[in-house]
Image (cartoon, rainbow, N blue to C red):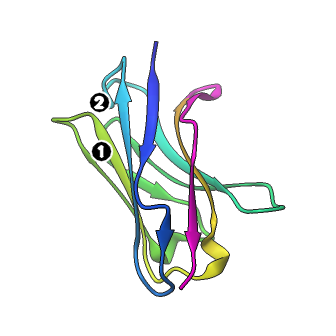
């Protein structure tokens, strides 16, 4: 059973960098052909895909946040991370990490709320 758990600060100040980590258990993040992604849901809005890092280690970013996003991984501890720079209150959201296969997102973390505020 694959499990994902998000962790990181719940409060970030405007203009700072949001940093989250997803710890994966039950499966290696290097396993072909899985992709490990970040998505978010802002209050009153739908899900927004942020990007993913592939089993190979290659990242891919969605167009809306591409200029501010970096996704990396640490295979030694089976984690992948999200950094979102220059945050504003509009980046307030519940952030989820997920596993993606050929059919879609099959495993999700429980999500973590990040509030951008002074």
Left-right relation of 61 to 83: right
Q: Secondary structure at mark 1?
A: loop
Magenta stretch? 101-118
Q: Earlier in the sequence, mark 2 or mark 1?
A: 2
Q: Main secondary structure of the magenta part?
A: strand
Is 3 above or below relative to 12?
Answer: above
For the residue pair 75 and 94, the one nearer the viewer reads as 94
Q: Is residue 46 magenta?
A: no
Residue most toward the top?
Answer: 1
To which residue does mark 2 refer?
Answer: 30
Kindly check if marks 2 and 1 are in contact, taking CB atoms under 8 A apart as contact.
yes
Name which residue lies at 35% across and 20% down: 27
| Crowd around label 2: few <14 · some 14–19 · many ≥20 (10 Å) | some
Report how far apart the C-alphas of labels 2 and 1 lie in the structure.
Answer: 8 Å
Name which residue lies at 53% across and 35% down: 109
Task: Tell me how many marks there are.
Answer: 2
Q: At which x and y percent is residue 45?
A: 81, 61
To which residue does mark 1 refer?
Answer: 57
Name which residue lies at 15% across and 35% down: 76
For the residue pair 49 and 40, the one nearer the viewer reads as 40
């Amino acid at each position: 059973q694959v499990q994902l758990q998000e962790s990181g600060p719940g409060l970030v100040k405007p203009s700072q960098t949001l940093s989250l980590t997803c710890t994966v258990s039950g499966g290696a993040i290097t396993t072909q052909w899985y992709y490990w992604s970040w998505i978010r849901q802002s209050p009153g809005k739908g899900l927004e895909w942020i990007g993913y890092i592939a089993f190979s280690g290659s990242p891919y970013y969605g167009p809306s946040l591409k200029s501010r996003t970096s996704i990396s991984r640490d295979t030694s501890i089976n984690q992948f991370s999200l950094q979102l720079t220059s945050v504003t209150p509009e980046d307030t959201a519940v952030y989820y990490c997920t596993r993606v296969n050929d059919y879609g997102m099959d495993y999700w973390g429980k999500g973590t709320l990040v509030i951008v505020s002074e």
